[in-house]
Image: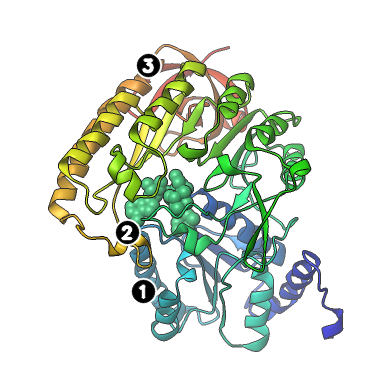
Amino acid sequence: MEGLIPVMEPDRQYYFMNKCKELILDIKSDDKPLTYSVVTFGCQMNAHDSDKLKGILETIGYEEVEGEDADFVIFNTCTVRENANKKLYGHLGHLKSLKKKRPNMLIALCGCMMQEPHVVETIKTKYRMVDIVFGTHNIYKLAELIYNRLFQGERIIEVLDKSYITVEKLPQKRKYSFKSGVNIMYGCNNFCSYCIVPYVRGREKSRPAEDILAEIKDIASKGVKEVMLLGQNVNSYGQIYDYQDGKIVRVPEEEKVTFPELLTMVCQIEGIERVRFMTSHPKDLSDELIAVMAREPKICNHIHLPVQSGSTDILSKMNRRYTKEQYLSLVERIRAALPDVSITTDIIVGFPGETEEDFLETMDVVRKVGYDQAYTFIYSKRTGTPAASMDNQIPEDVIKDRFNRLLREVNDISYKRVGRYEGVTKDVLVEEINHQDKDLVTGRTEENITVHFKGGEELIGEIVPVKLISCKGFYYLGEREN
Ligand code: SAH
Ligand code: SF4
Ligand code: F3S
């Protein structure tokens, strides 16, 4: 039998998906299909990984259900902040009792938290009901891991220290048929001193442009209109291709495709009407990118540009590699070329050593830039990062006070910024029927502003002009124009 198992991917995984299809018949107690639930804790990349896991599970024959009462539950974890981490243990407690009632239930844990050895140790000793543990580098292998678990009857723990291969052409389930995330690169090499992502996601590696374009052409032919290109630092796309013996293998000069070039090619794909990307690291954002954004109407009028702090001193301790002035002048250049662009950001409050003056510099940047939206975070100490062992960790009450002041400021500014569209007609990509009022539909403008307006199911997936009537903070009530 062994000899028949394909060695090459993705054939090997399709082989295991078929095998699992047979094996799960033994778990079934009636004619109904087995159910699954993939619970996502993390960022857009994490959510996109979940879509791949769902694709594999549906090929095996599982059917998705809401909630955690399912035959197969996967938690796709995040560890960027301590509270993301704590959340998992709460859910696991709940699952322990569920599994008592459903002895055949399978529980799998994957994602960023599983790349931390102390977490896996805790799972091994304290959560024995967990059946499968895997990390960020082998999600493509889900079918093989399920097969091993069912066949061997023992729990399977497989966490790799890095990505050995990238597997293309595996199934994927999209929440929406008309929009999708697409990975353009994996990992991160920036090592911002507070951040755990480079440790749990591994080294930066770009996906070949031809693979990205082939995937987008394929999903466009299936009805996808909006793509979100995903990477921790999309502006450095196309530099690093691979690693050999620990050394960087750069993309050969003649094959190099920069991020602005990639965007231009994506915009040429028939059927694609909107292109988004995240995240842009300010240190690598080129004038060429700004020019492409100004030139290509399909690129959404929005840029997420995390500042993290407004103090040059703190930025240097964070290893962000730009100053307050450089960031502000970048924003000026962007606004000169794209006057109405929506700029959003991430801000961390309470980084070690942050003084009141440093914090006021952050407030100053917030006022000067005028963000459409800012995601604010309280600094969270991540074991293993350089910032965790820095002196002058800030007391909780000081952080809370600063956080509240910042939040008030960003909310006030964002309310005014988003309000500038009152009375304006914008194209809205309709996503779903409104959850509260069935006579309304909900969609987004290219600035990523949510709009609710009167309409029915037939509009889902369509881009329609909507007059933005009243601004309610982060969303609008609108009326469809003809
Ligand atoms: N690659 C992206 C960010 C990914 S993490 C970038 O560089 O912009 C998303 C956000 O989480 C970060 O922008 C940062 O604001 C926040 N974050 C990361 N580590 C954190 C920590 N230790 N404490 C608090 N917030 C953190
Ligand atoms: Fe983390 Fe910095 Fe990489 Fe973003 S760029 S993932 S903040 S290390
Ligand atoms: Fe994303 Fe959290 Fe991992 S933010 S990359 S899921 S640590």
Q: In whole angstroms, how far apart are the C-alphas of marks 3 and 1?
A: 46 Å
Q: Which residue is mark 2?
A: 387
Ligand 1 contact, mark 2 (Cβ < 8 Å): yes
Q: Amino acid at mark 2?
A: Ala
Q: Earlier in the sequence, mark 3 or mark 1?
A: 1
Q: Residue furthest left?
A: 397
State which mark lies toward you, 3 or 1.
Answer: 3
Q: Residue at x 81, y 66 (%)?
A: 11
Q: Which residue is mark 3?
A: 420
State which mark lies toward you, 2 or 3.
Answer: 2
Q: Is residue 472 visible?
A: no
Q: Residue at x 48, y 27 (%)?
A: 447
Q: Residues within 10 Å of mark 1 (few under 14, many from 20)?
A: few
Q: Amino acid at mark 3?
A: Arg
Q: Quadrant of the N terminus?
A: bottom right
Q: Residue at x 53, y 62 (%)?
A: 37
Horizontal side of residue 52 vs 3, given as left or right: left
- Work out whether 267 lies above or below 191: above
- Work out whether 412 lies above or below 304: above
Tell me the SS state at disc 1.
helix
Residue closest to the eye, 229 or 98: 229
Q: Quadrant of residue 221?
A: top right
Locate residue 185, reporting x and y percent. 62, 50
Q: Which residue is mark 1?
A: 93
Residue closest to the eye, 90 or 170: 170
Q: In whole angstroms, how far apart are the C-alphas of marks 2 and 3?
A: 39 Å
Horizontal side of residue 18 vs 420, given as left or right: right
Q: Is residue 317 visible?
A: yes
